[in-house]
Amino acid sequence: QPYPMPVLPDTSKLGQYSSRTMNLLHYSTPEKKNDVRILVYGQSISEQEWWLEVKRAVGERFPDANLIMENKAIGGFSTQYLFKTVEMDVSSFYPDLVLLHIYGGIKDYETVLSTIRGRTTAEVAIMTDHYIGENKWSDSMSYFLLPSLADKYKCDLINIRDPWKRYLKDKNLEPSALLSDGIHLNDSGN
């Protein structure tokens, strides 16, 4: 890789709303392999290859779990489209955990969360936007609106934005160093 891996922040306080999924992972044994279903959902950023590294890392950390991880993200589908597809996409997979990242309006974002909560028992981890440069909308979503929805729907919030900013600053890089087209991740961004 052209750039070194980032130092990961303390994650000890994450997971308060995904304890069932964590218990399934932790208490899997060679004799009793728990099925753990994780769904990556959202749009084109969620489609990218970063999720394969997450799948590899979870599988390596919990080798006794029967990890069933799929990506049903739909490129180009912001919240105003995903709220129409979420019921079939998520309900048909019936995950234990949904890793969710979507761009779009807050009203439709809430509809997506409400549908996941109403149709499944899935725990949800909402990911904030990565940093592509100064952007008031992404700042507002990442620091105010998404945390508010995470509180309301009892979802974990994975802060992607601040570690990206810190990494870029520490390595003296512009956001474009981790992007392929100004928004999507290149290999280093993944």
Image: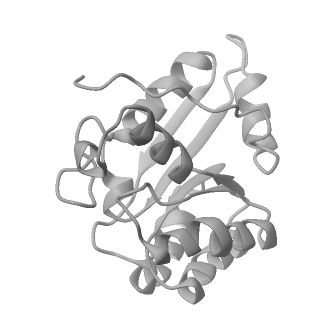
Query: Does residue 4 sit above or below 187 in this rendering?
Result: above
How was this image coloured?
one colour
Please state the horizontal and vertical placement of residue 179, each as a whole percent of the image. Answer: 24, 50
The residue that appears at 67% across and 22% down in the rendered structure is 33
Left or right of 23 on screen, residue 65:
left
Please state the horizontal and vertical placement of residue 29, each as a whole percent of the image. Answer: 72, 14
Query: Does residue 133 sit above or below 25 in this rendering?
Result: below
The residue that appears at 58% across and 27% down in the rendered structure is 66
82 and 88: which one is in front? 82
118 and 77: which one is in front? 77
Please state the horizontal and vertical placement of residue 121, each as a whole percent of the image. Answer: 74, 60
Dividing the image into 4 quarters, which one contains the C terminus? top left
Q: Residue furthest top?
A: 30
- For the image shown, how many numbered marks are present on the structure? 0
Q: Residue furthest left?
A: 181
92 and 99: which one is in front? 99
Left or right of 51 on screen, residue 8:
right
Left or right of 25 on screen, residue 37:
left
**Image-quadrant location for residue 167:** top left
**Image-quadrant location for residue 53:** top left
**Image-quadrant location for residue 153:** bottom right
Please state the horizontal and vertical placement of residue 1, each as a whole percent of the image. Answer: 24, 22
Query: Does residue 10 sit above or below 30 in this rendering?
Result: below
